Amino acid sequence: MDFPQDILNKFIVRGDYLKWIKNQTVVFVYLDLTNIFHWQDVLGWKFRVEDMIGQLLGFPNVKEIKVYYGKNERYLHNSESFHKRIKKTGAILRTKPMKFITKTIHHGMFFQRRTITLFDDGVKSKIGELIDELQKSGVAVEVPKCNFDVEMAMDMLDDTDKLTAIVLFSGDSDMRAPLERLKVKGKRVAIVGVRGRVAKELYAVKDKYIDFGKFYTGKRVYIKSENPAFGAGPHN
């Protein structure tokens, strides 16, 4: 199989990643989009969904791509516009309405636990006072939630007889059980992720791990840092 020239031209993808995909006969791809959007914080840059899907469809043996992403009914126009962009790529979209979970305001929303230990008692006291005031004010913090663990697992198992290998873009430990079922049936499994965002349970069942940052060849928009040491512009 010849690799698409645009992939070879834009970015030097690790050869073992390309070889693994090349050696599979029929590949299905499953993208947990909410999960992988969080990877951008680790990578320091944003990716384009269209570029990612286009890169994958450039491989002749990638026969189907399923994308899982919720519908935000509070911002329905924007949500539906984004869904149309996904469908236009040729991928199959799985969606359902997002739920919004109300969370209690606490220190962890503002600081990592390790960071808090660096503060002296005076600073910790001030932070505690601020948290108390926010809690008393009645301010509500709502977090969108839309898990697709069940839908992804069912699709994988339903697709078993159509494929020889899967590429899973997710780091969720809940995916271990369906992946183990696929392995029992002789299917090959590649996990795509970034450092610190892939559960150890998935490492235990994968045949191949692919670092997303060393695989993606599309446009990258670097995130501006709030740290003045990096200046006002984008940084690597």
Image (spheres, rainbow, N blue to C red):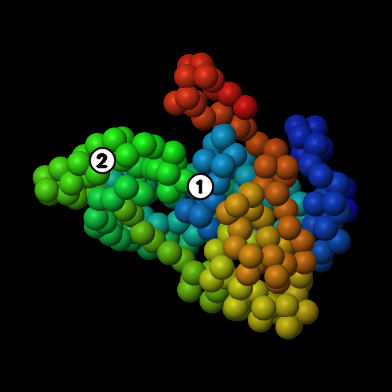
| Left or right of 196 in this view: 33 | left
Numbered label attached to residue 37: 1
Q: Quadrant of the C terminus?
A: top right
Outermost residue, front direction?
A: 121
Residue drawn at point x = 54 percent, y = 51 percent = 36
- Where residue 165 sits in the image (x, y, percent)? 74, 68
- Distance (Cα) linking label 1 and label 2: 34 Å
Q: Secondary structure at mark 1?
A: helix
Give whichever of 18, 235 is nearer the camera: 235
- Report the amino acid beneath label 1: Phe
**Could you tell whether 232 is left or right of 204 in the image?**
left
The mark closer to the camera, 1 or 2, is: 2
Residue at x 73% of width, y 58% of height? 209
Say which element carries label 2. Answer: helix
Q: Choose the circle earlier in sequence order: 1 or 2.
A: 1
Q: Quadrant of residue 188?
A: bottom right
Tell me the number on the disc at residue 204: none
Neighbour class for label 2 at 10 Å: few (<14), some, many (≥20)? few
The correct choice, above or below, for 135 with respect to 29 in the image is above
Q: Give the amino acid at mark 2.
A: Ser
Residue 196 horizontal/vertical position (percent)? 60, 52
Q: Which mark is residue 125?
A: 2
Residue drawn at point x = 80 percent, y = 32 percent = 9
The answer to which quarter of the image holds residue 200 is bottom right
Q: Residues at badges 1 and 2 in contact (C-beta under 8 Å)?
A: no
Residue 19, located in which quarter of the rendered image? bottom right
